[in-house]
Image (cartoon, grey):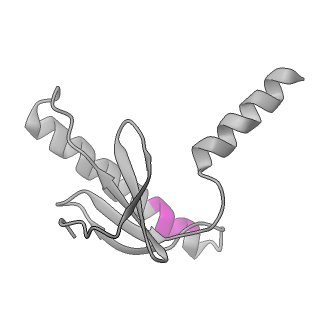
């Protein structure tokens, strides 16, 4: 999965990953942190990528509305998943936090 075609649109970037949209799918790419030792960085990114893919697969198996994983690669630290129209989870949680703080 390593090379990104030019037709991918950057949707969001967080502290650990970038989200790209391509057609009906989303590519989540975990990037390296230069301040971490390379062995530790690789281990953390690999563990987090595997864990996220497992969680998404379990949610799908439980019929919980979540994106289905079509590919995952713990060597390139990428997960390709179904695109679900709507807001990003972090935006929804941020709005809910603002709603609660007004009450």
Nearest the eye: 36 or 47: 36
From the top left corner, tell me how far across and down residue 64 is, in percent.
65, 68
Is 37 magenta? The answer is no
Where residue 76 appears, as percent x and y from the top left, is 19, 60
- Magenta stretch: helix, strand or loop mostly: helix
In the rendered view of the protein, which quadrant contains the N terminus? Answer: bottom left
Magenta highlight range: 55-59
In front here: 74 or 19? 19
Which residue is painted at 25% across and 46% down in the image? 31
Left or right placement of residue 31 versus residue 89 in this view: left
Q: Quadrant of the C terminus?
A: top right
Count of number-bearing discs: 0
Kindly identify the residue that appears in the image at 19 percent across and 44 percent down.
43
The residue depicted at 73 percent of the width and 30 percent of the height is 97
Which residue of the protein is positioned furthest toward the right in this rendering?
103
The residue positioned farthest toward the front in the image shown: 6
Residue 4: name its quadrant. bottom left
Q: Which residue is more in the foreground, 50 or 10?
A: 10
Viewer-side residue, 46 vs 70: 70
Figure quadrant of residue 98: top right
Left or right: 23, with 79 as reference point: right
Quarter of the image holding residue 92? top right
Residue at image position (66%, 35%) is 94
At which x and y percent is residue 67? 54, 68
Q: In the image, residue 68 lies at what x, y percent?
A: 50, 73
């Amino acid at each position: 999965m390593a090379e990104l075609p030019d037709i991918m649109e950057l949707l969001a970037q967080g502290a650990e990953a970038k989200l790209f949209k391509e057609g009906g799918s989303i590519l989540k790419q975990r990037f390296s942190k230069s301040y971490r030792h390379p062995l530790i960085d690789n281990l953390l990114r690999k563990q987090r990528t595997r864990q996220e893919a497992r969680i998404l697969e379990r949610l799908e198996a439980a019929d919980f509305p979540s994106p289905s994983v079509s590919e995952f690669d713990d060597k390139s630290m990428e997960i390709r998943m179904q695109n679900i129209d709507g807001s990003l989870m972090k935006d929804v949680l941020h709005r809910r936090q603002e709603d609660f703080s007004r009450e």
